[in-house]
Image (cartoon, rainbow, N blue to C red):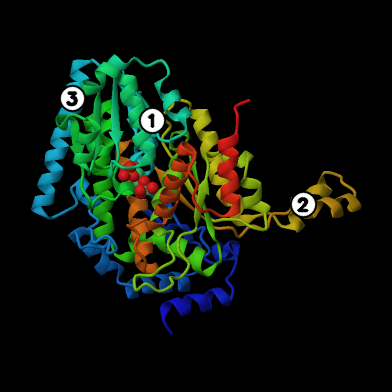
Amino acid sequence: MNNWAKLQKLADAGLPTLSEIFAGDANRATRMSFQVGGMYADFSKQRITPDVMQALFALAEDKNVVGKRADLFAGKPLNFTEKRAVLHPALRGSSTDKSIQKLVKDMRVRTRKFAEDICAQGQYQAVVHIGIGGSDLGPRLLADGLRANGSPALDLRFVNNVDGASINDALVGLNPRTTLVVIVSKSFGTLETRMNSEAARDWLGQFAGDNMIAVTANKDGAVNFGVDPAQIFEFWDWVGGRFSLWSAVGLSLQLAYGPDMFDDLLAGAASMDGHFQAAPLEKNLPTMLALTDIWNTNFLGYKTRCVVPYARRLRKLPSFLQQLEMESNGKSVATDGGASVDTSPVIWGGEGANAQHAFFQQLHQGTISAPVDFIAVLTDAENRPAHHRALLANCFAQSEALMCGKSETVVRAELKAKGMSTPDIDALAPHKTFPGNRPSTTIALNRLDAHTLGALIALYEHKVFVQSIIWDINAFDQWGVELGKELAGTILGELENGTDNQHDSSTSALIALARNHTPS
Ligand code: F6P
């Protein structure tokens, strides 16, 4: 029997509950927790028995995770539908290819110098970063995350959506003379970024020549747009958009927080690269994260996963991971062109503790629940120790509550002790009962700084890669985003020019509705 079938059999046979598993294994938390760099990861609250764990590791071996991992770092063309290597680890120094090393080093030197010069000149007060998807989500997450160590030197603002509110809000109160606009687009052809860049160029007016820079893999596109070639920072087709924040895409962060911080970020990611490459599968954090998610998705039937950072400055992590995981592994075609097994769960989440007062009700008692990734930070960066203890207490309490639940017997005893009558207890007890046995992983960072943030993001990048190997899909293309772009282009023409194309009756009616609408 192969390991996939073996895992299915173990799931079908039924598992002991998490509370039972813990009761029978005094060392479970120790055995299933890992300390890597500045990070502690506890997988013990996953519904995984030793048999399941063994079969998951055997599955990873069968699928040649070790060999594919070597291929990734060696720059093999793993993105086979686009015939491209996948070398984002090279951006943090994790490549042995001398020519790639040189490209990366030269760009690193150039962006550092640019950031230092800007800082020394003191001409700018604000940076407006324009980009979307991978050209936005990583820098935006980090712009918040890095605030834990101090305020940015420049007012860093982001523009992503084609909704005019995005650029309008970003420009409020800024002076074109003292604002540097950073256009980030790998393709330099993305509609949203294009329109926002045009608006920013108009707004800059006479300052557009000096105060507009571009980060792109399409230098010609940026030149044609009017960016001075000396102000273009390139990256390469072997860097996927959602893996690109380590490249010049992170330039706005260097401008706001300084190049040393960026080096720390890269070093943190490089330390995770080193761990991922060297650690045996059983002690390998990205592999553990991947395997537990596969167990939940493919064998326990969970179709979503919830990400809850108990850190305000990481509140954009769920959005970042939505792109990283769902754009990478939201696929249904296997490498041979046939149908794949179930792939990425839907990723969603929110900021803890706020989320407790919103959707946690359903996680605890709903008919449809989800495994949770809890992210905690051990060091208080805000000099509010009481707040910080309360934040951590809430985080740890949630995973405990999800796992242990509260039996009806306990609920009844509590209500009785409060003097409630038996009929009232009968009516209320079922509503106050928690089923428990709901899985979670907790990742605790020692502190929130550039190094641990780099390691955390690289952890999830490699987790996504391991899953793609086991699911036998290409994690590095994104053909699924193209059809909507094409159709939007057609409809935009119809809205602008009043031309008509063939649509279904619903879409035609919506187009007519927008065309015939008169502002009220
Ligand atoms: O639409 C999806 C996507 O292609 C992402 O993969 C990418 O990160 C984003 O658009 C932005 O693309 P670009 O950097 O080329 O503007």
> 80 or 300, which lies in front?
80
> 76 or 313, which lies in front?
76
Residue 25, above or below 415? below
Q: Residue at x 11, y 40 (%)?
A: 106
Query: Can the viewer see residue 38?
Result: no
Figure quadrant of the C terminus: top right
Question: Mark 1 against mark 3, which lies toward the viewer?
Answer: 1
Mark closest to the chain's N terminus, 1 or 3: 3
Q: Residue at x 57, y 37 (%)?
A: 514
Q: Residue at x 60, y 29 (%)?
A: 518
Q: Are marks 3 and 2 in contact (CB under 8 Å)?
A: no
Q: Is residue 453 left or right of residue 294?
A: left
Q: How many marks?
A: 3
Mark 1 to mark 3: distance in Å? 21 Å
Question: Mark 3 against mark 2, which lies toward the viewer?
Answer: 3
Q: Give SS at disc 1.
A: strand
Q: Is residue 28 left or right of residue 288?
A: right
How many neighbours does mark 3 have within 10 angstroms: few (below 14), some (14-19), or many (20 or more)?
some
- Residue 428 point in image, percent of width and height: 82, 50
Q: Which residue is mark 3?
A: 116
Q: Which residue is mark 1?
A: 158
Q: Which residue is mark 2?
A: 431
How many neighbours does mark 2 have within 10 angstroms: few (below 14), some (14-19), or many (20 or more)?
few
Q: Amino acid at mark 3?
A: Glu
Q: Are marks 1 and 3 in contact (CB under 8 Å)?
A: no
Q: Residue at x 18, y 18 (%)?
A: 120
Quarter of the rendering containing residue 433: bottom right
Q: Amino acid at mark 2?
A: His
- Residue 23 point in image, percent of width and height: 57, 63
- Residue 192 point in image, percent of width and height: 39, 38
Q: Give SS at disc 2.
A: helix
Mark 3 to mark 2: distance in Å? 60 Å
